[in-house]
Image: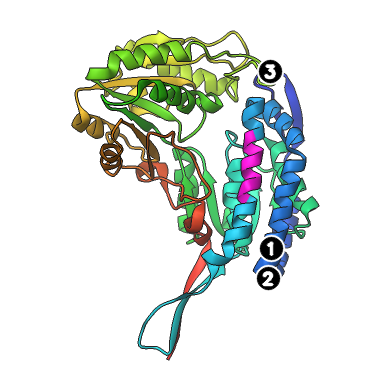
Amino acid sequence: MTVETVNPATGKVEYTLELMDSAAVESILAAAESAFPQWSARPLAERGELLRKVGAQLRSRRDDIQRVMTAEMGKLRKEALTEVDKCADACDYYAEHAADYLRDQPIATEASNSYVRFEPIGCVLAVMPWNFPIWQVFRFLAPALMAGNVAVLKHASNVPRCADLIAAALRDAGIPTGVFAALHIDNDQAADVLRDRRVAAVTLTGSERAGRSIAANAGDQLKKCVMELGGSDAFVVLEDADLDKTVASAVASRFGNVGQTCIAAKRFIVVDAIADAFVQRFVDAASKLQLGDPNDEATTLGPMARQDLRDELHKQVQASIAKGAKPLLGCEPDGSHAGYPASILDAVVPGMAAYEEELFGPVASILRVKDEAEAIKVANDTTFGLGGSVWTGDRERGNQVARQLQCGAAFVNAVVKSDVRLPFGGTKRSGFGRELAEHGIHEFMNIKSVYVA
């Protein structure tokens, strides 16, 4: 079976790939099983040195990786380069901090010696999406390899060369054969891989539907899983917010990566006292975004990753307008293959797709509320719980509101982002488990108690 990758900016086929057969998959899984004992037994310092070399490889080929990312999923050149740098930094971070995160932790008991030990569990299957085709992988991979695990990657079908470039960077850095490999397989094959006895756990970043399927499969096999799913993040604007900073941040949070990010601000919950002023400035700022060629430095909004994704987003917009949402900007497809302009819907209320669902693209929903108490209520009135932000001139007030948001990450006067120093993940239907920081490296480890009487 073959799959094609289509350049979202041009509609032209970029690459044709033959999916792996069962023999090729078996060879990769056998290599992973063989590599695990040796890799996990290597001193942590040696694994760290190799991971630093991976980071160096990424930096040395950042332009090549950028070109492939842009061709496969339409990412702006400057955003793609930043993504590569972030992955390299994550490699350095875990190389530096893993020893602290993984050292034995003494526990005071009546024993002569009792402590907690962290041990790797084996091969981790990663099922990763296309929207951050390098970062999503390294977000799990850097801590997993430093922990002593090995990994296989089932990447999204429209970014196969990104998967191959990751594998090449690890290979050229000296990571041994079998420690990491890209599997070019379909969803049915991925389910078979998860059921294989040699796979110890699975991590997924993707849709709620994919999460349900993979988590059910993992549960049936009694295998550990981490699910990082969708989000409909609240962007709460209180009446004392600095409008200049808040509007600039609103544009960055909603329209970065063409809005195709799980932690993008999607629901702009604005108190009435400041709503008209915020909306006017937001529309003015967003209208200046230039949709165009993602390789052109003048472009500030690239195409969506696929035409079908653009069409699905537009259906959600149309359905919301039909129920009374007011289109203030955009809200019609661009003439290019997968282009959709910066768009803003006002007067969004419960029952609309723009209120109830995740809009995974460059569409902002304005939800007007009377006061702070209602803002918190509306922010939590969602099945999602990934991130949220609060904008106010009073930091302590913002802190108190942030503590009441039902999400995995709450930011005050800052755009929600994934930071290697902070745990990342969600609650409710945004998934479970954590990536990054100390919490992420412990997810795929046996947390073992040792008691010496």
For residue 88: magenta?
yes
The answer to whether 248 is drawn above or below residue 422 in the figure is: above
- Circle 3: element type: loop
Instruction: Read off the residue under disc 3.
Output: 296
The image shows residue 431 at horizontal and vertical percentages of 42, 46
Name the one closer to the observer, 87 or 450. Answer: 87
Instruction: Read off the residue under disc 2.
Output: 43
Q: Amino acid at mark 2?
A: Pro
Q: Badge 3 local density, few (<14 within 10 Å), some, or many (20+)? A: few
Q: Is residue 398 left or right of residue 386?
A: left
Q: CA distance from mark 3 to mark 2?
A: 45 Å
Q: CA distance from mark 1 to mark 2?
A: 7 Å
- Circle 2: element type: loop
Instruction: Read off the residue under disc 1.
Output: 47
Part of the protein shown in magenta:
82-90
**Residue at the image point whose x is 66% and y is 46% from the top:** 88
**Residue at the image point whose x is 38% and y is 10% from the top:** 327
The image shows residue 271 at horizontal and vertical percentages of 25, 23
The image shows residue 37 at horizontal and vertical percentages of 68, 70
Indicate the quadrant containing the C terminus: top left, top right, bottom left or bottom right.
bottom left
The answer to whether 333 is drawn above or below residue 366 in the figure is: above
